Image: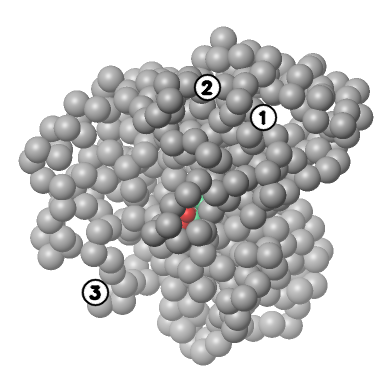
């Protein structure tokens, strides 16, 4: 835990997070208020979750309507909005079939199971999956094993076997690591690593990996849990490279705050699971499905992909300009409304100072300030984020 973050006294909740001493009470658009009435601009969106911001005037009545009708019914019965949301995801991704669950790790866990069964169905008894340095895929034992961060893995061994780890953006390293290995069944990565520090995969690398997967009959599995759902200005970040994966886990922004996960699969992976192979109690429940359907509908009505691209570029330009030539700013990177500012030193202490100044954000990989605001962010709000953040970063780096 970062030394700057003092836990709020909470004797019965497990001590798993370094929390700021703030409790949020309500929100509206890109603003939230804490229980003392202090107002904040939301540069975090609940970690890339609150796509439509807070208390969206079209989402709230739709969810109220759904809650009053049916929250949960179980997958023993058909849930009509599952088919509606699946169709929406299929049309926007170029894939064919969807499995619904409740979280990001659960979507990734399903993807890993799909890859293993894909191998077993081909007679590969000990399938191996290529994963990446600095990757983050979740906190279950399997997704933790796929994650490329020794810090979050420490203390939880033995990890799950069957992973081959490679560095990002190096096609020769991928070929070398998998040479003469007949057990490889899939390649699995985030288009833009989120927790790893906002590290994008290059477009050419994505194309090269797609071609290699086709050549070797591997599944291309792209974790779009954080960078997907419009955040970069396209529905899914890999679409900037013009490629289509075989398997795509989603979660975070898909329900605009309502718990939801999904695995979207194309023809190579869509029929691997048969009845009895996989399931989950909460996945695909009527409330989360309604949230997904309404989120996509409202995003399109309000042109939020274009907004994410335009306002993201505006915010990026304001940060580039404000921090140009500042010693200790190593890099500013990302796409759309998924931006990272890498500093030359650990910067967890920025969180409290930004909050004091009325801005919520996060820090990943120790030294990267992460901005993942709601996709409804306006250019005026982007200017406000930069106006708060730039002087804070300068002062912090001058210490
Ligand atoms: C957050 C995240 C996950 C895990 O999602 P949970 O809902 O926390 O389980 C997996 N992959 C990526 C890329 C993420 O950003």
Q: Is residue 55 visible?
A: yes
Which residue position holds label 2? 41
Q: Work out how far the residue at label 1 is from the one at label 3, CA to CA, in angstroms.
A: 52 Å
- The residue at 45%/67% (across/down) is 109
Residue 164 versus residue 93 in the image, above or below:
below
Q: Residue furthest top?
A: 380
Q: Work out how far the residue at label 3 is from the one at label 2, CA to CA, in angstroms.
A: 46 Å
Identify the secondary structure beneath mark 3.
loop
Q: Position of residue 42 (x, y in %)?
A: 51, 27
Tell me which label, 1 or 3, sits earlier in the chain: 3
- The residue at 46%/84% (across/down) is 120
- The residue at 62%/76% (across/down) is 155
Mark 3 crowdedness (10 Å alpha carbons): few <14, some 14-19, many ≥20: few
Which residue position holds label 3? 275
Q: Nearer the viewer, residue 18 or 244?
A: 18
Q: Position of residue 237 (x, y in %)?
A: 57, 41
Q: Is residue 230 visible?
A: no
Q: Position of residue 189 (x, y in %)?
A: 61, 58
Q: Position of residue 316 (x, y in %)?
A: 69, 23
Tell me which label, 3 or 2, sits earlier in the chain: 2
Tell me, yes or no, whether the two marked residues, 2 and 1, touch with CB atoms within 8 Å: no
- The residue at 61%/14% (across/down) is 384
Residue 103 versus residue 202 in the image, above or below:
below
Q: Work out how far the residue at label 2 is from the one at label 1, CA to CA, in angstroms.
A: 13 Å
Mark 2 crowdedness (10 Å alpha carbons): few <14, some 14-19, many ≥20: many
Which residue position holds label 1? 353
Residue 268 versus residue 295 in the image, above or below:
below
């Amino acid at each position: 835990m970062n030394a700057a973050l003092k836990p709020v006294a909470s004797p019965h909740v497990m001590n798993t997070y370094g929390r700021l001493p703030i409790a949020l009470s309500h929100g509206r658009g890109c603003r939230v208020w804490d229980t003392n009435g202090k107002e904040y601009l939301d540069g975090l969106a609940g970690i890339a979750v609150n796509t439509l911001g807070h208390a969206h005037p079209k989402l709230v009545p739709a969810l109220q309507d759904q809650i009053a009708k049916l929250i949960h019914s179980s997958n023993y019965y058909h849930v009509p909005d599952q088919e509606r949301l699946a169709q929406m995801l299929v049309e926007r991704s170029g894939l064919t079939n969807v499995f619904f669950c409740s979280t990001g790790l659960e979507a990734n866990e399903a993807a890993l199971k799909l890859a293993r069964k894909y191998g077993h169905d081909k007679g590969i008894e000990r399938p191996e999956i290529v994963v990446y340095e600095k990757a983050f895929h979740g906190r279950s034992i399997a997704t933790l094993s796929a994650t490329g961060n020794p810090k979050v893995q420490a203390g939880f061994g033995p990890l799950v076997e069957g992973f081959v780890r490679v560095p990002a953006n190096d096609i020769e390293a991928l070929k070398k690591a998998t040479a003469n290995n007949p057990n490889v069944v899939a390649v699995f990565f985030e288009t833009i690593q989120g927790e790893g520090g906002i590290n994008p995969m290059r477009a050419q690398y994505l194309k090269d990996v797609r071609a290699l997967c086709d050549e070797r009959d591997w599944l291309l599995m792209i974790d779009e849990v954080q960078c997907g759902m419009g955040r970069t200005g396209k529905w899914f970040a890999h679409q900037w490279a013009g490629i289509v994966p075989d398997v795509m886990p989603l979660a975070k922004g898909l329900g605009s705050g309502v718990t939801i996960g999904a695995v979207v699969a194309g023809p190579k992976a869509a029929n691997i699971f048969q009845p009895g192979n996989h399931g989950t109690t909460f996945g695909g429940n009527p409330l989360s499905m309604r949230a997904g359907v309404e989120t996509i509908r409202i995003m399109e009505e309000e042109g939020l992909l274009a907004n994410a691209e335009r306002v993201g570029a505006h915010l990026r330009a304001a940060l580039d300009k404000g921090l140009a030539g500042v010693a200790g700013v190593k890099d500013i990177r990302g796409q759309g409304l998924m931006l990272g500012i890498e500093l030359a030193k650990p910067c967890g202490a920025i969180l409290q100072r930004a909050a004091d100044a009325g801005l919520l954000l996060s820090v990943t990989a120790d030294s990267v300030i992460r901005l993942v605001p709601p996709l409804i962010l306006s250019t005026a709000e982007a200017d406000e984020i930069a106006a708060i953040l730039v002087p804070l970063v300068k002062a912090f780096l001058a210490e």
